[in-house]
Image (spheres, coloured by chain):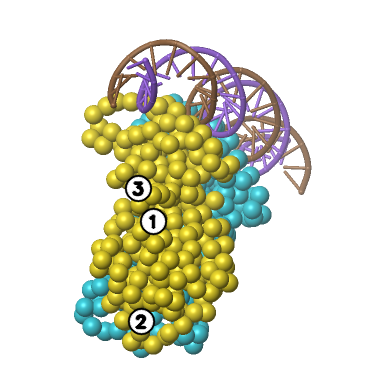
Chain colours: A cyan, B yellow, C purple, D brown
DNA sequence: TTTATTTCAGCTTAATCAAACATTAACAAT
DNA sequence: ATTGTTAATGTTTGATTAAGCTGAAATAAA
């Protein structure tokens, strides 16, 4: 995966440029980063390239069908990425078939953009936990994979640096004491390590972040600890 | 059957030598072993002789038609071999007729070689279970038979090396901890084996892969485990 | 036997830690 | 205001520790 998107991203896979454009505008208004694909082949490329948070997938596509894309995401990528299918088909049978393929929701064309937005929000809420992705102010981390990005650029972190970023992302805009951070690093308290060690880890993490962006996301709160903030 | 083909093999049945050549080059670039047939009669011979993994079948052929070949494969050979039909015909009726004959997919001429490759990959993946095969970035394994190939070249693996490759192929692009790998090697946890043992198995597996290709598909992720990646 | 698996010990590299010193922030005394 | 004091934090450094690799020997399995 060469790039990781910041915040909430949607890949819209739809061959009709009018519908694509309409959906795009509405999504952007809601603060989503929108990627587009006009056919199945392009969709696969974009998914591999960007790994979006959610997929809006037309079923009738040139080159590779929506069904095949869905199957590919689930079985080959082994991804739990939320998928909402867009389709003209309405029969119950078709719908069940879609869910069997692993879709999370179904929107029947023609749909109102408002309805689509509601469903997107709903699906994201429902699937937030299983996505394995955490995002905040341009940072994205995948705890399971031990990968972290800032505004699409991958951060090369050590195990501890990653864990510190992880606990920060779990508690953004909140002061974390050195003790809290230590407890998170050594889950079961096996080791007695000096508070000051955290300072050094924080320094390293700050340096690696500063390589990618000049902003300082890790604020120190004198006498209390550190706070990870939105900028 | 006089010859047993390694890895992924394709029989291209097409009377136009230009198209045949083009398709051949693209397939070989992807690591397929390509066999060619210029007419229906030759096609039957080659199928009997080589039993390829997949058939790319032009419908308009000299001597014996593509339809007849398809019927013959399914009804007389009783083979489930994947078949992709290549044709200039476009009508829905024709397409349905093709699927009725037992084709797995349809590519309409003129096609882009890229699209054809995608469809070949897709069909092979879709039919993998019925063929008992798993493929990823040039690797192919047959879990039932314990055989593995990289880009057509057979890998001579021990039982454990094979199992490790197997779990990697099931979870590509994902970090697997030593513990996860051990759990897979000793399914029911009968044995307590040192983590370091995994290192050694990985080393051997890497060596055997490196004999065939210089690329390093098994990345170590310090503090986490190993990751099998596409390159 | 031969072959596969496992452990072990030495080695290399990278990560972690703590101590020493430098800097800053808060604030009291001037 | 300016200065001094102190405690907290930042930074640098080098030692220590841990992770992973490797070759070889020991053990188990075929």
- Could you tell me how many numbered marks the image carries? 3
Chain identifier of the residue bearing label 1 in the image: B
| Location of residue C26 with respect to B9 vertically, above or below | above
Q: Residue at x 43, y 79 (%)?
A: B60
- Quadrant hosting residue B195: top left
Which comes sooner in the sequence, label 3 or label 1? 1
* Mark 2 neighbour class, 10 Å CA radius: few under 14, some 14 to 19, many 20 or more: some
State whether discs 3 and 2 lie on one chain.
Answer: yes
Q: CA distance from mark 3 to mark 1?
A: 21 Å
Chain identifier of the residue bearing label 2 in the image: B
Pointers 2 and 1 in contact (C-beta within 8 Å): no
Q: Residue at x 50, y 39 (%)?
A: B209
* Residue matched to label 2: B95
* Mark 3 neighbour class, 10 Å CA radius: few under 14, some 14 to 19, many 20 or more: some
| Residue B142 - label | 3
* Residue matched to label 1: B49
């Amino acid at each position: 995966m060469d790039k990781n998107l910041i915040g909430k991203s949607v890949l819209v896979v739809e061959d009709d440029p009018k519908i694509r454009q309409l959906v795009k505008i509405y999504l952007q208004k809601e603060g989503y980063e929108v990627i587009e694909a006009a056919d199945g082949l392009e969709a696969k490329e974009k998914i591999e390239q960007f790994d979006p948070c959610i997929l809006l997938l037309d079923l009738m596509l040139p080159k590779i069908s929506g069904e095949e894309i869905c199957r590919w995401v689930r079985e080959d990528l082994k991804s739990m990425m939320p998928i909402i299918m867009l389709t003209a088909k309405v029969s119950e049978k078709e719908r069940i078939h879609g869910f069997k393929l692993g879709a999370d929701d179904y929107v029947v064309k023609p749909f109102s953009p408002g309805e689509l937005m509601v469903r997107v929000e709903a699906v994201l809420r429902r699937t937030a936990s299983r996505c394995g992705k955490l995002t905040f102010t341009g940072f994205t981390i995948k705890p399971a994979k031990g990968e972290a990005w800032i505004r699409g650029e991958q951060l090369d972190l050590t195990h501890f640096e990653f864990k510190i970023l992880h606990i920060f992302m779990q508690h953004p805009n909140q002061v974390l004491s050195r003790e809290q951070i230590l407890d998170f690093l050594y889950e079961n308290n096996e080791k007695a390590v000096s508070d000051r060690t955290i300072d050094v880890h924080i320094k390293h993490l700050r340096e690696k972040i500063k390589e990618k962006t000049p902003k300082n996301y890790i604020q120190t709160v004198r006498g209390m600890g550190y706070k990870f903030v939105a900028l």
